[in-house]
Image (spheres, rainbow, N blue to C red):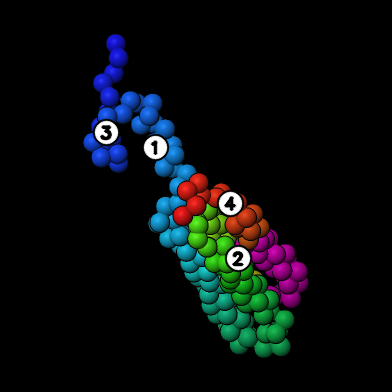
């Protein structure tokens, strides 16, 4: 039993078979969506905003610990500034991805590119946010403990390095995702 032809609004009242309708949907998927750059710019924004949120939290939380430790042991303040520096680097990771992504947003811009750039920004930004939370908590407790027991400096730095690596993983994946491209079929 044959199926009746379908009505397709995009062809202005022409009757099409199911196979023709499916092909028209497939061909439209390869065209440039005018909303695609929105996703690319959201990737740019996500990378910078989330990475900077992580950097800000890590800096603030570690800074509170340094100030508290400095009251007890002011000679060790400069030695214990490491968590603040490591948290600041997370913001640089977000900036790097944002610059790479914004340079790749040019017409014609496919939906594939928009989604890939959104994924790149989220990978870097959210990894930076997670790393900033870890650096802030470890930095706060670590510098306070180091102010009382100096032998805890090396373990604190090792823990901070592993926390920073989380942000670096996001940067690496973000760079890889930012290089994934697919051209538009209609050339718009």
Tell me, for residue 181, which label it has, or none.
4
Q: Residues within 10 Å of mark 1 (few under 14, many from 20)?
A: few
Measure the alpha-carbon separation of dots 1 and 4: 21 Å
Q: What residue is pinned by disc 3?
A: 14
Q: Residues within 10 Å of mark 2 (few under 14, many from 20)?
A: some
Q: Residues within 10 Å of mark 3 (few under 14, many from 20)?
A: few
Q: Earlier in the sequence, mark 1 or mark 2?
A: 1
Disc 1, disc 2: CB below 8 Å? Answer: no
The residue lying at 62 percent from left, 68 percent from top is 96
Most extreme residue toward the left is: 13
Compared with residue 17, is residue 59 higher up or lower down, i.e. above or below? below
Q: Report which quarter residue 134 is drawn in.
A: bottom right
Measure the alpha-carbon separation of dots 3 and 4: 35 Å
Horizontal and vertical percent position of residue 77:
67, 84
Determine whether, in the image, residue 77 is placed left or right of residue 31: right
Measure the alpha-carbon separation of dots 1 and 2: 32 Å
The residue closer to the viewer here, 4 or 164, is 4
Disc 2, disc 3: CB below 8 Å? Answer: no
Q: Main secondary structure of the magenta part?
A: helix
Which mark's residue is nearer the viewer, 1 or 2? 1
Residue 113 in magenta?
A: no
Compared with residue 182, is residue 94 higher up or lower down, i.e. above or below? below
Tell me, for residue 100, which label it has, or none.
2
Q: Which quadrant would the N terminus be assigned to in this image?
A: top left
Q: How many numbered tags mark residues here?
A: 4
Q: Which residues are magenta?
A: 143-169
Which mark's residue is nearer the viewer, 3 or 4? 3
């Amino acid at each position: 039993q044959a199926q009746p032809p379908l009505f397709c609004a995009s062809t202005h009242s022409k009757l099409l078979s199911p196979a023709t309708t499916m092909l028209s949907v497939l061909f439209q998927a390869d065209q440039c969506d005018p909303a695609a750059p929105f996703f690319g710019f959201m990737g740019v924004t996500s990378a910078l905003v989330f990475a900077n949120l992580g950097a800000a939290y890590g800096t603030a939380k570690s800074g509170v610990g340094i100030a508290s430790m400095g009251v007890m042991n002011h000679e060790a303040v400069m030695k214990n500034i490491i968590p603040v520096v490591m948290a600041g680097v997370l913001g640089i990771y977000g900036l790097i991805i944002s610059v790479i992504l914004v340079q790749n947003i040019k017409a014609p811009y496919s939906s594939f590119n928009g989604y890939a750039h959104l994924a790149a920004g989220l990978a870097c930004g959210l990894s930076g946010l997670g790393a900033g939370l870890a650096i802030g908590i470890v930095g706060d407790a670590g510098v306070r403990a180091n102010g009382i027991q100096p032998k805890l400096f090396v373990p604190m730095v090792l823990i901070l390095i592993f926390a920073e690596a989380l942000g670096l993983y996001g940067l690496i994946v973000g760079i890889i995702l930012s290089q994934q491209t697919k051209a538009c079929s209609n050339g718009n």
